[in-house]
Image (spheres, rainbow, N blue to C red):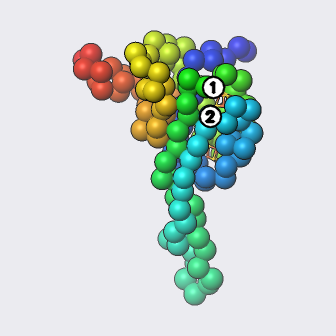
Amino acid sequence: MNTPRSLIGLEASKCTSCMLCVRECPVWCISLSAHSEPDPQSPPGGRQRMVNVLDEFTIDFGVCMYCGICVDVCPFDALAWHGADAGEKLAVAARDELVHDKEVLGLSVFDDLAVVDELNGEV
Ligand code: SF4
Ligand code: SF4
């Protein structure tokens, strides 16, 4: 099946900040920052485990060549293509607005693009 290569969305709660997508992107248009915190699910009495917490995640769609490698390599299915109409809904006038942050990347396949209409004041 052909997947419409519109824009890519991020489900931040699934992202472990493993950096695989950042390293595999051929044009280096993904960036992220994260920090470590004690894992609240560490068993009591055991060694304290740490988990990565995602702070920032951006994709610059002014540079992205829509190859889909990031979607394919993510081991946690945190990245996915938006629906076919996302390009139109998320269209912007200025080039620097093509850098989508975690919030915009999260408006997606995983939620409902109606949220975008809401943000754009169209509902
Ligand atoms: S689709 Fe390709 S170029 Fe675009 S962010 Fe993903 S890996 Fe990078
Ligand atoms: S490959 Fe997936 S889990 Fe790893 S940093 Fe990228 S989006 Fe997050």
The residue shown at (72%, 44%) is: 23
Asked if the residue at label 1 sits under 8 Å from ligand 1, the reply is yes
Residue 9 rendering spot, x and y as whole percentages: 54, 31
- Which quarter holds ligand 1? top right
| Disc number for residue 110 | none
Asked if the residue at label 2 sits under 8 Å from ligand 1, the reply is yes
Residue 55 rendering spot, x and y as whole percentages: 48, 53
Q: Decide: marks 2, 1 in contact (CB < 8 A)?
A: yes
Q: Which of the 4 quarters of the picture holds residue 70?
A: top right
Q: Which residue is mark 2?
A: 29
Name the foreground residue: 64 vs 70. Answer: 64
Position above or below: 51 against 4: below
Name the foreground residue: 112 vs 79. Answer: 79
Q: Which residue is mark 1?
A: 64
Mark 1, secondary structure of its residue: loop
The residue shown at (61%, 52%) is: 17
Position above or below: 22 against 2: below
